Image: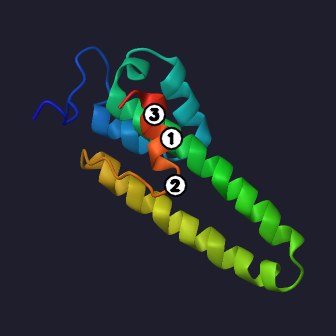
Amino acid sequence: MADEPNTAAANSGLSDNAAGAIAYVTIIPAIIFLLVEPYNKKQFVRFHAWQCIFLFIACIAVEIILGMIPIVGWIILPFFGLGVLVLVIFLIIKASQGQKLVLPVIGPFAEKQAGA
């Protein structure tokens, strides 16, 4: 029970679950949550914010690579974007339920940055 995030924040309007889910909406809330108290003190929110940032960087890199590959890359690119959208929606749902889903490659980096 000690590892579960708080469902209601004491001094703010957002619970840890809501802040973790909002961190995935775009990269901007993720950065804000890393800079603003009390969210930058909460490991659950920091983990989801870092995972969002690393996911964003990885997606940009893959999109650049696919964009440079003629025809085949251009065909795969929309499907990759759709897959990322589905993944982000899944991550939002998991974070709003208070679960910490660690993605295969970038998740351990996010845990390390969050201090997990």
Q: Are marks 3 and 1 in contact (CB under 8 Å)?
A: yes
Q: Where residue 61 appears, x then y in whole percent?
A: 74, 56
In this orientation, does residue 113 appear? yes
Q: Is residue 16 above or below residue 105?
A: above
- Which residue is at a point 18% across and 36% down the rendered structure image? 4
What's under tag 1, amino acid-wise? Phe
What's under tag 2, amino acid-wise? Val
**Mark seen at residue 109:** 1
Q: Are marks 1 and 2 in contact (CB under 8 Å)?
A: yes
What's under tag 3, amino acid-wise? Lys
The alpha-carbon separation of the residues under discs 1 and 2 comes to 8 Å
Q: Where residue 78 appears, x then y in whole percent?
A: 69, 76
Q: Where residue 18 appears, x then y in whole percent?
A: 33, 39
- Which residue is at a point 79% across and 71% down the rendered structure image? 66
Camera-side residue of 38 and 71: 71
Q: Which residue is mark 3?
A: 112
Mark 1 secondary-structure assignment? helix
